[in-house]
Image (cartoon, helix red, strand yellow):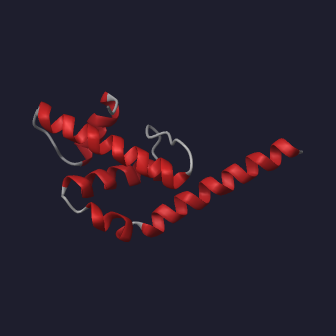
Amino acid sequence: MADSTLLADVRNYLDITWEDDAGDLKLSGIIDRGVNYIDGIAGSAQDYQLEDKARELLFDYCRYARSNALEDFQKNFLHELLALQISKEVEAYEAAETDVQ
């Protein structure tokens, strides 16, 4: 289940201002699936507390999933998903090169 801070941040992003326990449970599941999806694209676990590309993509993933339009997410965010994947691969390569030297 998504942590309470991340849940509150996604609720704010989606302009959900009312209390709804069932809705929060559903949104937590969406967040968890989004985290798994984006971590899979990035190739490693991301820190979604940082204001960066992974967090931005997670919020938009949640927006699409909540709107029942998830099938359009990858198509509409392909450039950003690839940019995240490439940047994480470069970081991993640089870290591996540093370890070798």
Indicate the position of residue 47 as horizontal and vertical percent values.
49, 39
Horizontal side of 9 relative to 43 (left or right) equals left
Q: In which quarter of the image is the C terminus?
A: top right
Is residue 24 visible to the viewer in this orientation of the structure? yes
Q: How many marks?
A: 0
Indicate the position of residue 45 as horizontal and vertical percent values.
52, 41
Q: In which quarter of the image is the N terminus?
A: top left
Horizontal side of 53 relative to 14 (left or right) equals right
Residue ID at (60%, 61%): 86
Horizontal side of 80 relative to 76 (left or right) equals right
Indicate the position of residue 62 as horizontal and vertical percent values.
28, 50
Which quadrant of the figure has residue 98?
top right
Residue ID at (52%, 65%): 82
Residue ID at (77%, 47%): 96
Give whichever of 67, 52 is nearer the camera: 67
Relative to 69, residue 29 above or below = above
Which quadrant of the figure has residue 77?
bottom left
Residue ID at (30%, 28%): 4
Indicate the position of residue 51 as horizontal and vertical percent values.
45, 45
Give whichever of 28, 4 is nearer the camera: 28
Relative to 92, residue 2 above or below = above
Is residue 52 visible to the viewer in this orientation of the structure? no
